[in-house]
Image (cartoon, rainbow, N blue to C red):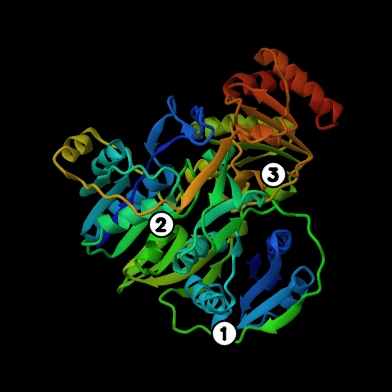
Amino acid sequence: MKVFAIAEHRFGELNPLSIELLNLANKLGESNAVVIGKEVGKFASELAKYADKVWKIEDPSLENYNPELYIDVLLQLFQKEKPDVVLIGNTAQGSEYAPYLAVKLNAPVVTDVVGVNTENGLVASRFVMQGKIMVDLKIKSMPCVLTIRQGAFKEGVQKSGQIVDAGIKPSKAPGRKFVEYVQPEAGEVDITKASIIVAVGRGIEDAANISLAEELANTLGGVVAGSRPVIDNGWLPKDRQVGISGKVVKPKLYLALGISGAFQHVMGMKDSELIVAVNKDPEAPIFGVAHYGIVANIFDIVPELLDKLKGK
Amino acid sequence: MKIIVLAKHAPDPQSEVGVAGDGKSLSLGTAVFDINDWDRYAVEEAIRIKEKMGGEVVVVGVGKSEDTLRKCLAMGADRAIKIPFDAGLDAYQTAEVICEAIKNEKFDMIFAGLMSQDLNNSQVGVILAAMLNLPFATAVTSLEIGNGVVKVNREIEGGYKEAVQLPMPCLLTIQSGINEPRYVSIMGIKKAKTKELKELSIAPKASTVEVAKMYLPPVKKAELITGDPSQIATKLIAILKDRGLIG
C-alpha cells in the first residue's frame, strides 16, 4: 500500500503526532511524509528518519496553516502520486481539513482512528459515545483518508528516507485568510504548578456547587480545575480547563469529581501520579484511566470527606 | 443575514447506551435524546445574529429530529426542514441529504456543531462545505460579522486561538461555550407551533461506511473503593495518607 502521512507543525515545532502517523504508515506499506510550509527543511530531515520518502511543499503563502491551500497542494500531489491511504493527525488542524480533502479525493474518511487492522481488508477502529463504545469500520474503497488520534501508534521503525521537493505551489488565492494566533489568557492561578487538583465535571450540576469543590481543594491544599462543560457554562474561568484545548497537568493527586472522561480531557491529566475518580456512572470512561474509582454521587462522598478531613 | 443551522437529535452518551444484539449497531432503548449539545450553541449563535441584524434562521434535521427541530423553533428559529432518512453512522450520507435539501436556499452562512455528542465524527459540516465548495472554519469560539466577511476565532491546542477571516457565504462549525444558550420559554413553544416544519423525503446514494463490529472497549479498570459514603471517605483518606498526600 502507498501511504501518505501529512505532517503538522506550528510555532516552528513539528507535532510529534506526525511521527506516529509514519509509524502506522510503515506498518501498512510504503511510507511517504508530506510537509507543507514556507521553509520546511528542518522538519523534512526529522521526518526522513521515519519515512521512505519525504515530500516538501514550500511557498511563502504556506507560512501559516490554511485548509484551502493545504487541500489545493495535496490534491495536486495526489493526482500524480495516487495514494491508497492518507493519514492526518486528528488535531484542530487535521480534523478540520481531512473530511473536505476526502470529498475532493472521492475517498471515504474515518476520523479519530485508534486502531487499524489489515487482516480482512482495511478496518479502522474508533470510539463513539465519547469513549464508551468502540466500532470497527470496514473501508469499502481506496483511496481513503484516516485521521489518527494522538498516542495510538507510538511504536515504530527507523528509516532514512529520501527528501524531495514536490515542486508544487498553490494554484489560487484562498477565500479564507489567516489573521493571527491569539495567546491564552493568563489566570491568577497556574493549575499546572499545583500538586493537588480537585477537578469537577458536568456532575457538579450547578455553579453554586463549585464552592463544595473549592472547600475540598482548600482542605487538601490544592486547587480547583474543571473539564470542558464546566468552563463552557462559565462556572470556572478558562485558565482552569484541563484537556487538549486547555492545560496539561501532572499533579501528585488528581481527584476527578463527576467527570465522564472524554478523550479531550483525559489527554490533559492521564499522567497525574495518582488519579481518583468519583462518578455515579459505572461505565464512565474516566474509570479506565483512574487508579482508584468510586461509583457514587459526588454529593454523597465530598461532604463525608470534608467532615473526616476536618475532624481528623 | 440568512443562516442555515444543522441540528441533530442525539442520544446523551452519559445516559444508558450500549451495543445491540447484532454486535453491529447501537442499543439506545433507554437513552435520553435531546438536541446535540454543540448544535444548541450553533442555533443560539444564529438566533443572536438574526436578532441583531435581521434575516432568517432555518434549521435542518436528519432522521428522527422533530423534537429537536421544535425546540429550535421555540428558541427562535424561523422554520425547519426535516429529512426523515436515518443515516446511522454515515456522515457522508447525512451531508448528502442536507446538501440536496438546501439546494434552493440562498444563505449567507451555514452553522453546524463541531461534532455530534454520540458519534463524535466532526465530519458532517466539513463534508457539506466540500460538497458546496464553501470556505469553512471549524471549532469557532467567537465571530464578528462586517462588510461581507466574518472574522472568527477557532480553538486550537493549548488554550490558543487561531483568528481567520472568511468571505460569505461560508460554513462554520461551532465549539461549545461560544455563548450561553437560552432556555425555551412557554411563549416560544406557543409560537413554534405556528412555524413551518417541512418534511422532505430524500435518500442518498450508496453508503460509504460499513460497520464490521461494535463492542465495549477493553479497558483497564480502576480499583474500586466500595462501601457506604462514610466507609468510602475513610478508605480514601487512608490511601491519601499512605501516599503522604495529606498529613
Residue density around tag 1, few if under 14, some if 14–19, many if 20 or more, within 10 Å: some
Residue denoted by label 1: A168
Instruction: Measuring from the top left, give residue A16's x and y in whole percent.
Output: 72, 62
In front: A257, or B224?
A: B224
**Share a chain, discs 3 and 2?**
no
Considering the numbered disc 2 on the image, is that residue within a helix, a strand or a loop? helix
Q: Mark 2 sits on what residue? A: B125
Would residue A91 be visible to someone looking at this image? no
From the viewer's perspective, is A263 left or right of A171?
right
Q: Amino acid at mark 2?
A: Gly
- Please, is residue B195 above or below residue B161 in the view? above
Crowdedness near tag 2: few (<14), some (14–19) or many (≥20) residues, C-alpha within 10 Å: many
Q: Tell me, yes or no, whether the two marked residues, 2 and 1, touch with CB atoms within 8 Å.
A: no
Q: Looking at this view, is A153 or B85 the one in front? A: B85
Given residues A212 and B165, the one toward you in this image is B165
Q: Considering the image in quadrants, where does the C terminus of chain A appear?
A: top right
Q: Is residue A229 left or right of residue A294?
A: left
Mark 3 residue crowding within 10 angstroms, few (<14) / some (14–19) / many (20+): many
